[in-house]
Image: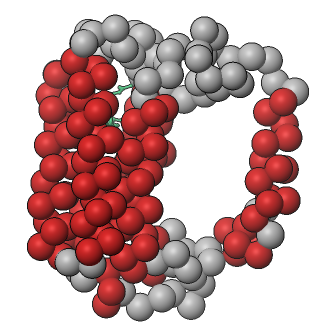
Amino acid sequence: MILAGMVIAVPFPALSQAQAPAKSRPTGSAAGSPIPGARVEANLAQLMRGTLFPSSNVIFAAQNVNPADVPQDKDSGTTVNLLASAYGKWTAVENSGLALAEVANVLMLPGRKCSNGLPVPLNNPDWPKFVQELRDAGMAVYKAAQSKNQDNILTAADTMTNACSNCHNKWREKPNLADRCK
Ligand code: HEC
């Protein structure tokens, strides 16, 4: 079992171990990607649940509690509460904003499917537009967190909520799963 505490103590060996098995795996479905070695592993719902869901929750939490007031957990190296982690308080909000902006890049990789098997609608001109909104929202959160001002976070969290729902309204909020991503 790899504990986050170990990752903090020895980040580089942990990273190369994590990457080692990937080299022996067959090339995945991001064929034609402009990024050498880039590979799609998750469907869109899995990607959202694994990345945007936890990152946005850190940002939502910062609306209700001043991150500076969150005490560090005793297990700050292993906690799943990022605000109380070794990289906690406002730093956790900064990094969560940056995570949104970076996930925007991954959302543009070719070859990803939605959970119903349809391709992610990369070729619809609204897709890159909504992805850019996410990137801008992430950077707005990053700036707001750097200011350590909760009013600024309220504004940036609103920008983020709009970025999520603009895309969801078009491609996710469907009575039938089969109609997502159409
Ligand atoms: C560019 C479009 C787009 C943006 C931006 C976007 N999403 Fe999504 N999201 C989707 C689509 C489409 C689905 C449905 C994916 C599927 O079913 O495979 C989805 C699914 C999800 C899911 C999983 C829902 C489920 O039914 O399992 C979560 C959680 C989620 N999004 C969170 C977020 C959050 C939080 C944000 C903003 C920080 C966000 N998303 C921004 C398009 C987007």
Q: Is residue 8 left or right of residue 95?
A: right
- Dividing the picture into quadrants, the one containing residue 141 is bottom left
Tell me what residue is drawn at x 44 percent, y 51 percent: 99
Residue 96 higher or lower than 41, as above or below = below
Tell which of 13 and 6 is nearer to you.
13
Tell me what residue is drawn at x 38 percent, y 65 percent: 94
Residue 149 horizontal/vertical position (percent):
20, 78
Tell which of 92 and 120 is nearer to you.
92
Tell me what residue is drawn at x 46 percent, y 17 percent: 113
Q: How many marks?
A: 0
Which quadrant holds the N terminus? Answer: bottom right
Tell me what residue is drawn at x 70 percent, y 72 percent: 8
Q: Quadrant of ligand 1?
A: top left
Residue 164 higher or lower than 79, as above or below = above
Residue 96 horizontal/vertical position (percent):
40, 59
Tell which of 43 and 105 is nearer to you.
105
